[in-house]
Amino acid sequence: MTEIARESLIVNLLIFVMAAFLGIELIRHVSRLLHTPLMSLTNAISSVSIVAALIILAKPKDNFVLLLATIAVALAATNIVSGFMITERILKMFRRQKGKK
Amino acid sequence: MSLPIQYLYVIAIILFVLSLRWMSEVRTSRRGNWAGAAAMLTAIIATLLAFPTQRNDLLIVAIVVGTVIGIPIALKLPMTAVPQRTAMSHAFGSLAVALVGTAKYYQLAPNIDTFTLSVLSFEIILGFLTFTGSCVAFAKLQELISGTPFIYPGRTVVTLSSLGIAIVLAIYLILNPAQGIILPIMVTFALLFGFLLVMSIGGADMPTVIAILNSYAGLSAAALGFVLDSKILIVAGTLDGASGFILALIMSKAMNRSFINVLFGGVGTKMTKDGDATTVERTVQSYTVEDIATILDNARSVVIAPGYGMAVSQAQHVVKEFADIIQARGIDVKYAIHPVAGRMPGHMNVLLAESQVPYDQLWEMEQINSLFPETDIAIVVGANDVTNPASRTNPDSPLYGMPILDVDKARTVVFIKRTLNTGFAAVGNELFYLPNTMMVFGDAKKVLSELVASLKQR
């Protein structure tokens, strides 16, 4: 491993650890009411893997790699579109008691 | 990568974090969802600017296909099918990550260093096992296959062996990076492991399983981030992984079980006899809808405890109608939500929100339990194991130690149930035989509709 690669690995590990702690703290404070929409939201967010597919799509070595990356973009795009839309649909249904005393 | 593009990635990361932050309460939750969508769009634009592709035709086709499939799923999906949809999208997401990992391997091989290949192998195995695992979860939730655990002698050994073989192959591949032929074999065993793992898990454990699969999908995206040196993948993937992890923890804690026990415990296999032995001798009191209408005349407070049965018979709307009628008579109505009621975390909340129950009537188990002794009538609609007092009193019960809704402490318990069959854990419910329990047999929706009709006549 080169010096630069080692350096960026350490930085990435730090980011990973920080994100893990941050994620745990954030999710612990999510109301149980919202666990289902939370899951559909994180579903959409996990399709950030579309970024990885796009990076590969930029310089594919051969047609096989190109094919895999294209399928991955389509799958991730499906999740992104349906994930955010369905979360919106679920969240719209939550409402307070009308004329609450 | 130019500086403005890196700033775009920073903005996307901030928005992802804010998205989850705003998701913590109902008031700001929609803003959270929009922040998430904005983050995703920013990340995609930044990537397209930094890594322009020659094949915009394929890119557009892929995005159009994804959108055309995604929109109808999001708009047409009935709320009772949300657990299935979640399992399906885990399958899509994890397959996407696994394919990208595979593509990356063929892109780099054979000039691939040990570290990169180790992370890639981990990511590919995790992605593909999550894919088949999620497909099985989907099939079980959609009832394409039976929800009961697929149990056979030595299944844990068989299941773990398939994972073991996949890992051994991964190590061989890491030591011999040019042996590209190993990869498909490794993938096959990873697929097999995910399949076997979830096949042996029953329907009622799905909340935990779905949460674990959610976590895996995120972690594999984060692993890709290490390979591609992409901060946005690491952060977003890890946030998602943490979310699934916490949800799985909450679910298994609510069942008083460990992850390992959920994955390999196979509940519902050994205790069937116990349930039979205790139920044979006793009889239960069966009541009619009219009886229930009568006792409602003198009630001031009612707590409704819904379960998966409410989802199955689509009774959430008639539950709300019933609640409206008795509320109009001055009866206080609350809903008691057990964390694992239903088939995914928060399932009951969503169904009741769909039928326009105000969310401040939905009470979590810890808060509502202290109120049961002052409750006149607790009505159990399609829940079973989460109300079984045996979990407090009977150390031999497989449910022992699981926190439950203390409906038995209410003055009267009305239990609506199709038959005397046991719940998922195959344990007879002690509640049926208590003197203050009134059993009403029938489909939840039908019984409640009759009750509503009866109350309207009075």
Image: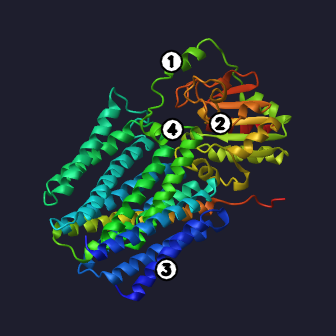
Mark on residue B11?
A: 3
Q: Which label's residue is closer to the chain start, 1 or 3?
A: 3
In contact (CB < 8 Å): disc 1 and disc 3:
no
User: Which quadrant of the figure contains the C terminus of chain B?
Assistant: top right
Q: Quadrant of residue B179?
A: bottom left
Secondary structure state at the residue bearing disc 4: helix
Residue matched to label 4: B204
Image-based side of B316 in relation to B208, left or right: right
Q: Which chain does tag 2 point to?
A: B
Side of A11 relative to B293 (left or right): left
Letter of the chain that mark 3 sits on in the rendering: B
Q: CA distance from mark 4 to mark 3?
A: 40 Å
Q: Report whether B195 appears left or right of B398.
A: left
The residue tagged 1 is B273
Percent x, y of residue B352:
64, 50
Query: Is residue A96 among the parts visible in the rendering?
Result: yes
**Mark 1: which amino acid?**
Lys
Which residue is at the front of the view, B370 or B156? B156
Residue at 54%, 42% (x, y): give it.
Answer: B252
Q: Quadrant of the N terminus of chain B?
A: bottom left
Q: Residue at x 27, y 68 (%)?
A: A70
Mark with earlier residue (3, 2): 3
> Which numbered disc, 1 or 4, marks the residue that appears first in the sequence?
4
User: Mark 4: which amino acid?
Assistant: Ala
Task: State the mark number for residue B404.
Answer: 2
